[in-house]
Amino acid sequence: MSFDDTLAHEALTEVLEEDALPIRQFMSYYSCALMEVETKFKVLNEQLSLHYDRNPIESIESRIKSASSIIQKLRTRELPMTLESIENNIFDIAGVRVIASFESDIYKLSRYFLQQDDVHLIQTKDYIRNPKFNGYRSLHLIVEVPIFLANEKRWVKVEVQFRTIAMDFWASLEHKIRYKKNLSEERLSEIDAKLFECAQLCHTLDDTMETMKDREDDFFVDRSMLAITNAQASRPSQAKWMNHVLSENKTIVNKKLILLDIDGTIQTYDGIIPESAISAIRRARQNGHLVFLVTGRSKGHIESSILSIGFDGMICGNGSYIEYNGQVIKNKVFETKDVQRIIAYLELHNLEFFMEATDGLYGSYGFTTRGVKALEDYGLKNPVITSVYPDMEFPECLVQPNITKINYILEEYQDYLGFKANFPEFQCSTWGGKGETAIFGDCFLQGIDKHDAIVELADHLDFVRKDIVSLGDAEVDIPMFEASGLSICMGSGREAAKRAADWITYDTDNDGLHHAFEYFNLI
């Protein structure tokens, strides 16, 4: 035991209502957990270096949180001064910092680490893709790992931080410059601005180094070599503590009704469908589960590339249309006179649009050109309207039957406000790409709701709520989450959706759907 360890134990003994021996034993668990995690990364580094002429890990550091910091956290959160309270509420007592060569190495290393079957992921905070306001970048994981003592096995929480050399350089010096200094507010503001600028320069440096890296330098992991099984991919929502959900759903043996959003869930916003997502959906159906699409799109707006995956049915138009095994259960459409009124308004205000019907897509003539910029803003690269919407028609008479939803391009946000004021009898909203910027306005019938449609479908199929599993990525998916027994948000999803979900998996383009299915034993 080091001198610092002794001081920590003495400090905790003075505050906590515990004897010295239990405190020493308690803190020793975290020291053991650090050794376990450090060893895992050293093994990974060694194994990966066998295939390449470099190591992905530059250095590994570890630390145990000081007694004063632990006590301060308990007081700040107004938590009981007990060892049980510390264990259940403070997850960063043991900390390991992994410094990687490149930003891409961080995500590969974290993924290989989490795939090990004795590493349980509790929480993720990705400050690389979502930096802190001051420019700080790092990937934080809270995990549980087992330690094997003389007569017991214990699970202990450890915080793992991943940084590049540039990220660590900035964070180390920022701490020395910024904290525990008696500086004026004016001076602090000046320093903060310069530190943020430096953070951006470090990020640019990382990006530049990444582009110079050998394109073939992509770590390959032989699963038999690393003895990796049972990938741990989902993570709890940062807003909800879902141990009870995990205990109830970890083993799914009965048939589930699985509900899937399309954009940002099955496919990325630039239209890429990961092969792992296709495989997961098909395997889930093979296992006897029912898999449904739940989308704001009409049936006619769903590409053949998605339908070809194979589904048991769909809820479309935000709940206006329900289909199961080819049988239409519900189909609510606009009246012809209302379609005429809306088209006249849009044409009068020079707003290009397209309409979704249960049997097709119909666009205004100007949508072929104006739609390009809108779809670029949405996230598509060099879109061609006829390629993005190969089945879209541009008829001379735009008044068509079976219309479930009307979408129009916003030249400015006032266009949406004006439309909404003129058509209060309909549900009006906006939608966009990954950031949900208001790019399009839309209009659909009142009384249409995803939540109600899911309840209607579940009643029809005789499913209870606890057997409904849903995956989505945006605020519009929250009603779907609320109708489900287990809701999962994609890691690339919106913060509001993450807060509403029970669990959060990886990004769509990082096999998030597959990992969620695997973790909850749907496949």
Image (cartoon, rainbow, N blue to C red):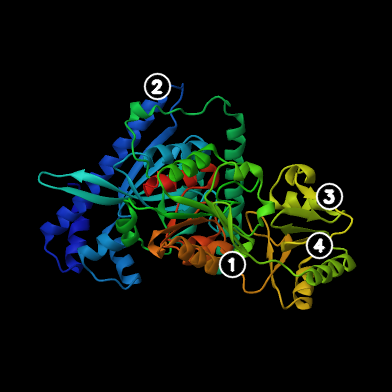
Query: Alpha carbon of mark 1 to alpha carbon of mark 4: how far?
Result: 41 Å
Question: Who's the residue at 52% across and 40% down the image?
Answer: 278
Q: Badge 4, how many Cα within 10 Å: few under 14, some, many 20+?
A: some
Q: Mark 4 — residue?
A: 411
Which of the two discs, 3 and 2, sits closer to the camera?
3
Residue 442 placed where, x, y %? 72, 65
Q: Earlier in the sequence, mark 4 or mark 2?
A: 2
Secondary structure under the numbered disc 2 in the rendered image: loop
Q: Residues within 10 Å of mark 2 (few under 14, many from 20)?
A: few
Three-letter residue code for mark 1: Glu
Which mark's residue is nearer the viewer, 1 or 3?
Answer: 3
Q: Is residue 321 visible?
A: yes
Q: Which residue is mark 1?
A: 186
**Residue behind mark 2:** 50
What separation in Å lies between label 4 and label 2 (alpha carbons)? 55 Å
Marks 1/3 in contact by CB < 8 Å: the verdict is no
Amino acid type shown at disc 4: Glu
Side of 271 where 50 appears, left or right = left
For this rendering, which residue is in front, 367 or 320?
320
Element on which disc 1 rests: helix
Q: Nearer the viewer, mark 1 or mark 4?
A: 4
